[in-house]
Image (tube, rainbow, N blue to C red):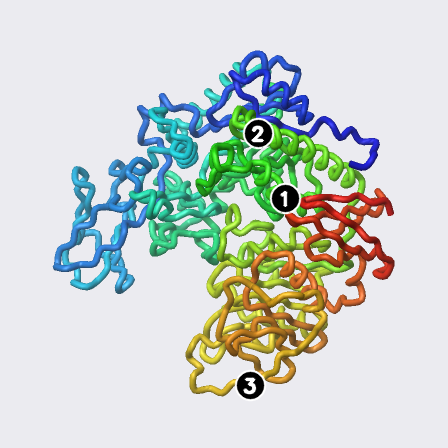
Amino acid sequence: MPSTNVDLTRGDFTLPGEAGYEQLTLRLAEKWGADTIRDSDGTQLSPEILESGKAIYSTVCLVRSVQPWARVNRDKLQQNFLMSFPVVAEKAKTTITLLDGFFTEQFAVNWRDSPKTWWQVFDRTTGEEVAKRKWVFNEKKGTVTIDGTTPGHRYTVNFLAFRIWEEISMYNHLTNDWGDREHLAAVDPMQPATQKVLLRFLDTWLREHPATKVVRFTSMFYNFSWFWGADRKTLRDVYSDWGDYAMTVSPRALRLFEKKYGYKLVSEDFVNGGLYNSTHNAPSRRYRDYMAFMHDFVIEFGRKCIELVHRYDKLAYVFYDDHWVGVEPSSPRFHEFGFDGLIKCVFNAFEVRLCAHSTGVKTRELRLHPYLFPTGLKGEPTFKEGGNPTLDAKNFWIDARRGIVRAPIDRIGLGGYLSLVEPFPDFQDYIEGLAKEFRLLKSFHAGDKPWTAPYKVAVLTAWGDLRAWTCSGHFTPGVPLYDVLESLAGLPLEVQFIDFDDLVANGVPKGVKTIVNCGRAGTAWSGGHYWSDPRVEAVLTQFVQKGGGFVGIAEPSALVQPGQCFKLARVLGLDRDGGERVANGKYKYAVAPSHFVTADAVSPLDLGKETDGIYVFGPDTTVLAERDGSPRLAVHPFGKGRAVYLSGFKFTHENTRLLHRAIAWSASQEATWGAWQSSNVKTEATCFPKAGKLVVINNAGTDESTVVTLADGKTAQKVKLPAHGIEILDI
């Protein structure tokens, strides 16, 4: 590690302590330079640890904290709408067992609040609601029986259910085989009685934790949506979405919403035919109103909790995972909570950028992986036989590091059971070096910003900045925008996130030279129904005509209509045939052998799951790669501007470079390309001009060599890097 005036041996690190392992806790606190010790779900801190002189983080999950009260107030538990699994009618009378197919240890049907008021029954074949007089419910049998059903038609019931086992408790319990440990339930903070109980609990808890410096809320009140199936081996996740507000619903919330907004929401607004309100789908205006309503409530009650923490002279941090719904750290209102810090668990670079993107807190902290559990999220061995936690840590770190180099982060840490690392001395040594590396990178951000290209890039989605640097939670395979974000997270580009309302109201933001639109047709990421507004097409078309750039990936601007699929087809110089153009002729193109965009490509193009059926309009469109007669990569001048099309995207070193070049070319910025570029696509270079430092990182698990061109795009610097390595050069 290069010499520096910064102490690289201690500070800015949070270590998970564990009662019963005091010597290990204090030894690793010294080795890793931890200035803070925290507890975790399932662990406690002993007096020896609390009195060690380290700052103490204590975790509290308010909605899981009052179990004795929750057990006797089952009507105050959190709830949500579920849609029964479809049943095909055989006769004129059909009975549906409501929880058939769901994990009954998680859910209990809410029979208390009038089913005829809140539930809905649908003939899904016709899409029509069944009149309430035609169905009856049987609480003892857990069923709904429908009269007058049409044989061959599909029927479902939307019903309210209490969640009798909170999802994170459930996951941790089953993952770690906690046996007969209590199943925790989450109480609904929108109930006035619940609010009083929670504030009373928090006040007592704060008095009983005098050693605690930081109260770490996990997270606030409402969980992301996670509906488990009856058979956890074949269909554990009936539905899961990190941004859906499905878990916040209650009759009280719906009544208050109607009073405030002047119209009534119904179960189908949340169930949506079984799709629910997945963040991956373009939201309706009714759903956005409900999100805003819940955000108001979470801020209002959350602020009361935080003010109470501050009265005890403690800091309030929020963990941006688990119960984060309604908190919305990317919202311009996030500062209204009064949080002192934000903690984000990270697997990838885009999650680092998500944490750094939030405004309204002084401290941003990353919880690194691997989590100190025997197994990972997918059940793979980590700190158990067959696992290699050191290699896991290296691979997670090189992904996160790409984001840390580009955006400032204040602290890092780990979570889980510290005792699990005792048999892994190599892991202990690696974390020591990792912590020093982080402190060095943090020091470069102090009073300086990494160099970025002299233009901005905007990512256009239905959510805009509210879902900046994420789609919905952690990386989900098959969603191409995730891969795009992961690539962008480590590139020397200033990235903005805009939505369609922004575009119509204010046009393209100042300084933006190119816009990226990426996603499957109908999704929030491509835009879905927002493309039905002709003003959107007009604004973007004129932007490119006047010299702007557009990068479309998968099914950009897709809104199927007679004769056209992509609304910006003429900008892109191509469109998609879904099978309806069999009788129409197609222009015969030739694949161009070389281009600026593909200059660093050394292997056949692999864009993951690609969109087929692409056809070009004419000779102005240059195809750079194709498969089975369908263009995979193409470029097209349009007016004074340029457009690039990719049929899909997968995060790889090679594709990250390809995307970077596509953005630069579409923005007509080839002349600025060479500055601070690394010749080896497995490595990346970042310049900190004021600090006079050049950071070169190896994103591969193999030794690599590279040549970095400096600011003039001509002067070269040769660098050799070990696997997962980093080199800091003075410039």
User: Which residue bears the numbered disc 3?
Assistant: 587
User: Which residue bears the numbered disc 1?
Assistant: 400
Q: Nearer the viewer, residue 22 or 149?
A: 22
Q: Residue at x 29, y 62 (%)?
A: 127
**Amino acid type at image mark 2:** Phe
User: How many labels, in total?
Assistant: 3
Q: Of circles 3 and 2, which is in front?
A: 2
Q: Which mark is residue 202?
A: none
How far is disc 3 from disc 2 in space, using C-alphas? 61 Å
Q: Nearer the viewer, residue 532 or 400?
A: 400
Q: Is residue 114 left or right of residue 677?
A: left
* 568 versus 202 height, above or below: below
**Amino acid type at image mark 3:** Tyr
Q: Nearer the viewer, residue 237 or 261?
A: 237
* Rendered location of residue 495, percent (x, y): 67, 55
- Neighbor class of circle 1 (other Cα within 10 Å; few <14, some 14-19, many 20+) is many
Q: Earlier in the sequence, mark 3 or mark 2?
A: 2
How far is disc 1 from disc 3 in space, using C-alphas? 44 Å
**Amino acid type at image mark 1:** Ala
Whether residues under marks 3 and 2 lie with C-beta atoms below 8 angstroms apart, the answer is no
Asked if residue 259 shows in the view, the reply is: no
Q: Is residue 281 left or right of residue 715?
A: left
